[in-house]
Image (spheres, grey):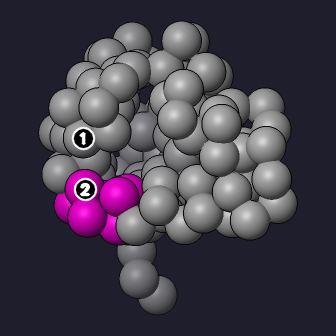
């Protein structure tokens, strides 16, 4: 499952962001899916990131792009895990050229549990 999620995120990054990361790791921990991407910045973004304004610009552009592709990415993770994705949280460290995605789901997918009750 983790390898399938990893591959889906790589494909998403390639198609939606224009290039894939250098390295991707995915981890399923109960009702969370954590994905760490290394080497995510393009050469142009690395140039921008040399100034404080550029760092903020890269972060904002990346956040906007993820907002546009969020539904597709969540749908892919949901299909792979068999669980409903409730939330997607992400941040990027421009200096490290790393991004982290955290997906929350409606069930403990690590142990194959039923969906959480809403009460």
**Residue depicted at 40% across the width and 74% down the height:** 117
Tell me whether the residue at label 2 lies in contact with that at label 1, contact meaning CB atoms closer than 8 angstroms.
Answer: yes
In the rendered image, which residue does mark 2 sit on?
A: 69
Residue 96 included in the magenta stretch of the image: no
| Relative to 97, residue 77 above or below | below
| Relative to 77, residue 116 above or below | below
Q: Is residue 37 left or right of residue 107?
A: right
Is residue 34 in view from this perspective?
Answer: no
| Relative to 116, residue 34 above or below | above
In the rendered image, which residue does mark 1 sit on?
A: 16
Nearer-the-camera pick, 44 or 75: 44
**Part of the protein shown in magenta:** 65-71
Nearer-the-camera pick, 60 or 30: 60
Please tell me whether mark 1 sits on a helix, a strand or a loop: helix
Can you say which quadrant of the picture contains the N terminus? top left
**Residue depicted at 35% across the width and 24% down the height:** 19
Q: Position of residue 40 (x, y in %)?
A: 54, 29
Q: Is residue 74 left or right of residue 88?
A: left
Main SS, magenta region, reads: helix
Specify few, some or many for label 2: CA neighbours under 10 Å numbering under 14, 14-19, or 20 or more: some
Residue 69 included in the magenta stretch of the image: yes
Q: Position of residue 12 (x, y in %)?
A: 27, 34
How many numbered tags mark residues here?
Answer: 2
**Residue depicted at 79% across the width and 43% down the height:** 50
| Earlier residue among tags 2 and 1 | 1
Nearer-the-camera pick, 113 or 81: 81
**Residue depicted at 54% across the width and 12% down the height:** 22
- Using the numbered discs, state the Cα–Cα distance from disc 2 to disc 1 in whole angstroms: 7 Å
């Amino acid at each position: 499952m983790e390898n399938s999620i990893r591959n889906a995120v790589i494909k998403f990054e390639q198609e939606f962001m224009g290039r894939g990361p250098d390295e991707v790791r995915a981890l399923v921990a109960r009702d969370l899916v954590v994905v760490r991407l290394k080497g995510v910045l393009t050469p142009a973004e690395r140039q921008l990131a040399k100034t404080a304004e550029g760092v903020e610009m890269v972060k904002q552009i990346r956040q906007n792009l993820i907002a546009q592709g969020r539904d597709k990415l969540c749908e892919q993770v949901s299909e792979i895990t068999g669980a409903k994705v409730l939330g997607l949280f992400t941040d990027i460290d421009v200096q490290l050229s790393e991004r982290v995605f955290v997906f929350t789901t409606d069930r403990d997918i690590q142990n194959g549990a039923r969906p959480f009750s809403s009460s």
